[in-house]
Amino acid sequence: MTAVDISDPVLHEMRERIVSAHATGMPLRLRGAGTKDFYGEALDGEILETGGYAGIVAYEPSELVITARCGTRLSEIEAALDANGQFLAFEPPAFGADPTIGGVIAAGLSGPRRASAGAARDFVLGASLLTAAGDLLHFGGQVMKNVAGFDVSRLLCGSLGILGLITQASLKVLPKPRAEVTLQFDCDAQSALARFNGWRPQPLPISATSWHAGVAHVRLSGSPSAVRSARESLGGSVLDDHDAATLWRDRRDQRLPLFAEGGSSLWRLSVPATAPLEPAGADLLEWSGALRWRRCGVAAGNEIRRQTRELGGTATLWRGNGTGPMFDALDPASLDLHRRLKREFDPRAIFNRGRMVADL
Amino acid sequence: MSAVAASTIPTDRSGRLLDALAQILPADCVLSRPEQTVPFDCDGLAAFRQTPLAVALPQTEDQVVRILRACNELCVPVVARGAGTGLSGGAMPCADGIVLALAKLNRILEIDPVACIARVQPGVRNLAVSEAAAPYGLYYAPDPSSQIACSIGGNVAENSGGVHCLKYGLTIHNVLGLRGYTIDGKAVTLGGAALDSPGLDLLALAIGSEGLLVVVTEVTLKLVPRPKLARVVMASFDDVVKAGDAVAAIIAAGIIPAGLEMMDRKATNAVEPFVKAGYDLTAEAILLAESDGTPDEVADEIAQLEQVVRTAGSTQCVVSQSEAERLRFWSGRKNAFPAAGRVSPDYYCMDGTIPRKHLGRVLGAIEQMEKKYAMRCMNVFHAGDGNLHPLILFDANVPGEWERADRFGADILELCVALGGTITGEHGVGIEKINSMCVQFAPAEREAFFAVKRAFDPAGLLNPGKAIPTLVRCAEYGKMHVHRGQLPFSDLPRF
């Protein structure tokens, strides 16, 4: 067991809670700002607030890295980056509120830029983990390339907190594009998909795509000359900057009416981008067609899962009002590896028990 | 050189293993006589050698599964091997185990030019993917210097980089999915053509796992559109620190070049006689900064780059005027390792990564170490990533030289860790840097790595003894070493 370099009182207190939960087997729910309480399977346990362990630890723009404690609000990080013309290129959804960076990484969700810039995990350079045993472990680091040891920091991204408490993360940041323009095309979902498929193999500065309610949008980002020449070759009509910003913010933060809580179910379908539109269908397309959202009646749930699986993807019940599990079941070999990893990192299953997989 | 332990496997078990392999593979796909196994006794790091019990060369995925099951049953270690170009001894065999050479699984299964995806077997060469994708205007971005020979399976095992990672990412950013098998022969499918799936990101864990977790039999790669144009700026500096500062200035100006490489004077002078790249041999350091994209975009960025390097004190700045000239500028950088082999009987390539701002400081310290160890070291860097490749020149035939080179290298790596960096940016730990892992990671962190290992491979049969050092090993190595960050900076001038 390593000497624990925990002098910060907030970190110390969180560690005490964890060590005592580990001793008694009492499960804990890790919670940052609570913006993603809806995300994951049902879980119980005492809430352990992580928002108090906050602050940017290091940020040097010329190193393209920011390191922050888990409770640091996304808004604080984005403001610091913005002041230096940089940003988090995976555009994490804020859900109209102000999540903590620990929650952003634990959830591993990415925004409209996912298909071109990469996912949250692609920008994780390092992470610190407070384990059930009370050890504070550091994986990865603050450098761009690092292959010493298994890539545990990227494993933690999207882990939904089931392996331990992520206390700190180092993220790669990028300069903001110098120019950006959004084009609009009136078309149905089928022809939007066809357009996305036609654009993908071309060297175009596309940073986001969307189709919803009979309109397709494409955002071009990069150098002014690259954006200009792409705009000329793609056609469509140009959206004014303010409308474009709102449009992408609505998608990133899931503010469209489609995402509202309601009677029917909302499904998130993650499929190969070139998968046919039918039979699963879509009310909203993102990520060049690789992310599809679909509203339908509660009864259609099993059918949606089956259809999506046949397309080579997975279906997540994003808004289901407790009508069924959120995630597709893992295949047996993968489930076995999940169980074993959980047992190694959190033998008494105190961290977010059941949030990813029942019992884990 | 490393000690070579005699095989300890009981004769009956090795006999049973060979019988099992004979049942699974055609006779010409099992190598067990010494003259057959010796060529597999090392990878690209020839200082560490060990002949295996046997070499198995499966031709199909089904044969891979059956070999794994047989080895699992007989408790025989398995070291997977691609093209054997690795630089950290990751594919060095075990005396009591087999080498599972995947070179015959070399088919490109599919190129999907609409989805921009390639599905390949692990033995496919890195460059072959880009060649197969070229008719569609696509390519596979990670380009390690060994790309003519190195295999995709090996790239996955090491999370290989190349000279274009800063803009296009490492292997992990360009692999969408893989299929592989755990030691007990169970299939695992990680990731896929969709961009995410529920559960832990086991794909991220498998990439760069150095053959310790799964044996990969199929990889789904992301292909990207070939930019219309690429040009490179070659800037000279009369001081390495200035060159390092120029790198920071380029990033600070909001530019992410397609490639950003540095070579010191020793490196340029070593390569120039062989490649005639046209390098400025009087410069203390040269910087190569590449821009790619549409012609207008490249023109803009090149102008910006020229301005930044001039402001940063560049003494000479040349821009490639043709594709032939661009390739010529790069040829020296790409041939730095072979050139080191021409100017010295042997060379030892290090792979530390540091925060970019410390480039000048590290170069200064390496110069001091050259005096301390009475050895020459030429430096090439993936400067944009802060990834250093110091090439320590030595002669293995002179008694004591390898040991000195080894200690020289370990000193460089400790300095990288002390400055907030890492012991390996892209070559992997393998057997080579296993002691340095004790410097970078605390016991509880190494135990977490073993925990991951146990979850995938409880019996520890896949590439045992690599990548993660045991407590005992670190205790032996650690007497004079202090853990991360606590290596006092006041010690630096001593180097």
Image (cartoon, rainbow, N blue to C red):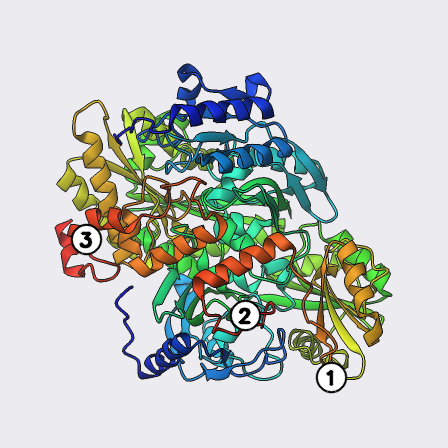
Quarter assignment of residue A92: bottom right
Nearer to us in this view, A37 or B410: A37
Residue shown at the point (20%, 57%) measured from the top left: B482
Distance of label 2 from label 3 (alpha carbons): 36 Å
Is residue B162 visible in this depiction of the protein?
Answer: no
Residue at 73 percent across and 56 percent down: it is: A273
Residue B481 is labelled as 3
Query: CB under 8 Å between callouts 1 and 3?
Result: no
Residue B137, x across and y down, in percent: 68, 41
Marked residue chain, label 3: B
Pick the front one: B386 or A25: A25
Per the image, label 3 sits on a secondary structure element best described as loop
Marks 1 and 2, how far apart at CA: 22 Å
Query: The N terminus of chain B is located in which quarter?
Result: top left
Q: Which residue is mark 2?
A: A160
The chain letter under disc 2 is A
In this view, the residue in front, B307 or A238, is: A238
